[in-house]
Image: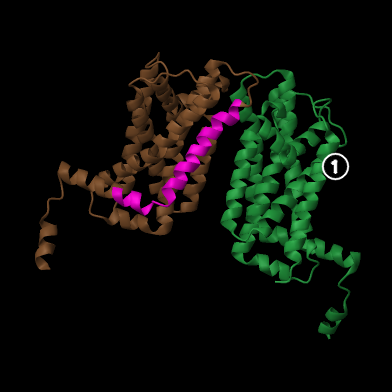
Chain colours: A green, B brown
């Protein structure tokens, strides 16, 4: 009886997609409670730590450099979530075997992906905001916040999660993914024009960063937090959208395959 | 058969020559059992240390030669300290995970020789990383440094102190995931919140007082003294504090590795 009802129930359309999406959000949250607590804790620590750390390293800063630094903090806070935490989640799911289980559920294949991105965005955004306010207070900077900060930060977060997720599902060897995430963290924290002007880097690094997404994340968000410190915002917007599309294309290709 | 057994049992198991033989054997044992892991750790340490000075230098629009010297020597000192405080516990944790830990400590060698072999193993990681970091920093920042003879005792003391602190933690804690976590906290604290690559005056007063007691800032002072203008003002106090911590860490390590289970 019940079986028949199940089989004839509608498994397509917006209503079904939405119901799947909501149940997948619950599923993502329930299976990784401890991980999320750990992520929130380390992110807050890192975000607060980064602002204070820069102050120690640099001593006093002129107001312009300080504004530049503070307006780079949101991107700096969003990057580890998308490029490190999301891949770690996928690696853990693969190790536990829940990865295959999730894909065997009768939901549209992009519903779990969308659910993961939603959860991570909701974790990342408030912490980015908190770190930024803290840094602004530390360096005594007044930001000129415009409404565009919400969609821009959202796009940056979505892009980072998409590329991180695509990378983690596309690379079969978890240790390789782990290595890449470590390299990303190292390069981003030390060699990236996020809190310092891109002109200060050697030409080759500047060229690389005009293609990589990190500089564009900070440039886009900076344009909504300051007046006149960000240039070529439209180009950054297009490049971030392009990276998001690439991320989604990789994810769709990998998870859409019949194994 | 029986003869050989008697001979082994009858061999002298004390005295300096037995101790040095044991040290050599343990060093060989650790170098061989970690021959795959060790080069990776050395390369990673070199990359972190040299990347550090180059990366931080971008933060300054114009860097004065004094600040450059501080940063360049600081990055190489950090490589040395991280080898002891962060890499040593991670290696011990990986030994515990692999199961070779219990075996190593069941061998018939004096435990002090075993610990000394660990310190020397960390020198194999720390000293090359330090030298490479210094060369890279010199290339990038054009450092004006002049090593004096005090570099030798300073490096030995800083390395020994760091390794003993790191290994006391790693020997004491049985759960390797906790050891890994603590080593990460050490790394974060030393890279970000210890005045080695920047002047101690940049810190708030309370943190400055904390670092005047902890050994890490003083390790920086003594090694930098050896790299720049020799023993300067107040350097002997730093030597004393690092030495005190070395003794304390040695006692702690001895208590932990000396206990019978």
Q: Quadrant of residue B234?
A: top left
Q: Residue B22 location, x and y as percent?
A: 23, 48
Q: Is residue A76 visible?
A: yes
Residue at point 71% right, 29% down? A198
Please give the residue where the numbered disc 1 appears in the rendered image.
A151
Q: If the image is split into quadrants, where does the C terminus of chain A sit?
A: bottom right
Q: Residue A161 location, x and y as percent?
A: 73, 50
Q: Which residues are magenta?
A: B28-57
Residue at point 12% right, 68% down? B1
Q: Residue A33 location, x and y as percent?
A: 66, 56
Residue at point 15% right, 50% down? B13
Q: Quadrant of residue A174?
A: bottom right
Q: Is residue B7 left or right of residue A251?
A: left
Q: Quadrant of residue B253?
A: top left
Residue at point 59% right, 46% down? A182
Q: Which residue sits furthest front?
A: A204
The chain under label 1 reads A
The vertical placement of B78 against A109, above or below, is: above
Nearest the camera: B168 or A56? A56
- Tell me if residue B41 is in the magenta stretch: yes
Nearest the camera: A142 or B222? B222
Q: Secondary structure at mark 1?
A: helix
Q: Residue B49 location, x and y as percent?
A: 51, 34
Classed neighbour count for the residue bearing mark 1: other residues with Cα under 10 Å, few (<14), some (14–19), many (≥20)? few
Q: Is residue A149 visible?
A: no
Q: Principal SS element in the magenta part?
A: helix
Q: Is residue B171 left or right of residue B46?
A: left
């Amino acid at each position: 009886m019940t079986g028949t009802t199940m089989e004839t129930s509608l498994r397509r359309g917006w209503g079904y997609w939405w119901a799947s999406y909501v149940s997948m959000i619950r599923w993502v949250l329930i299976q990784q409670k401890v991980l999320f607590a750990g992520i929130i804790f380390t992110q807050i620590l890192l975000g607060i730590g980064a602002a204070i750390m820069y102050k120690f390293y640099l001593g006093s800063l002129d107001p312009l450099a300080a504004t530049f630094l503070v307006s780079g903090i949101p991107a700096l806070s969003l990057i580890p979530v998308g490029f490190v935490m999301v891949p770690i989640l996928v690696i853990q799911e693969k190790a536990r075997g829940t990865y295959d289980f999730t894909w065997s559920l009768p939901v549209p294949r992009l519903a779990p992906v969308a659910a993961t991105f939603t959860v991570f965005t909701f974790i990342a955004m408030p912490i980015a905001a908190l770190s930024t306010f803290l840094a602004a207070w530390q360096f005594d900077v007044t930001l000129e916040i415009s409404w565009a900060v919400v969609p821009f930060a959202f796009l940056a977060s979505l892009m980072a999660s998409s590329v991180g997720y695509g990378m983690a599902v596309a690379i079969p060897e978890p240790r390789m993914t782990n290595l890449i995430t470590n390299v990303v963290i190292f390069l981003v924290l030390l060699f990236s024009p996020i809190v310092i002007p891109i002109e200060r880097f050697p030409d080759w690094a500047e060229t690389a960063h005009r293609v990589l997404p990190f500089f564009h994340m900070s440039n886009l968000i900076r344009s909504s937090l300051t007046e006149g410190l960000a240039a070529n915002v439209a180009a950054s917007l297009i490049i971030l959208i392009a990276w998001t599309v690439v991320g989604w294309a990789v994810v769709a290709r990998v998870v859409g395959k019949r194994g | 058969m029986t003869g050989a057994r008697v001979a082994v049992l009858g061999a002298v198991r004390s005295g300096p020559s037995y101790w040095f033989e044991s040290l050599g054997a343990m060093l060989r044992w650790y170098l061989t059992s970690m021959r795959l892991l060790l080069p990776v750790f050395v390369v990673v340490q070199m990359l972190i240390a040299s990347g550090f000075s180059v990366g931080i230098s971008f933060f300054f629009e114009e860097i004065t030669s004094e600040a450059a010297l501080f940063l360049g020597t600081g990055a190489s000192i950090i490589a040395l300290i991280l080898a002891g405080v962060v890499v040593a516990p991670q290696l011990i944790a990986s030994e515990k995970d692999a199961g070779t830990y219990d075996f190593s400590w069941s061998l018939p060698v004096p435990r002090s020789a075993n610990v000394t072999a660990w310190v020397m193993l960390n020198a194999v990681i720390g000293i090359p990383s330090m030298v490479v970091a210094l060369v890279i920093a010199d290339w990038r920042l054009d450092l004006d440094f002049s090593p004096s003879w005090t570099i030798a005792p300073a490096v030995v003391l800083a390395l020994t102190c760091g390794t003993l602190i790191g290994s006391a933690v790693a020997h004491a804690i049985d759960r390797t995931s906790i050891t890994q976590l603590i080593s990460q906290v050490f790394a974060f604290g030393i890279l970000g919140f210890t005045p080695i690559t920047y002047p101690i005056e940049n810190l708030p007063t309370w943190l400055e007082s904390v670092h005047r007691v902890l050994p890490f800032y003083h390790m920086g002072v003594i090694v930098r003294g050896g790299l720049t203008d020799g023993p300067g003002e107040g350097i002997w106090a730093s030597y004393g504090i690092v030495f005190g911590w070395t003794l304390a860490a040695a006692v702690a390590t001895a208590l932990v590795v000396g206990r019978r289970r």
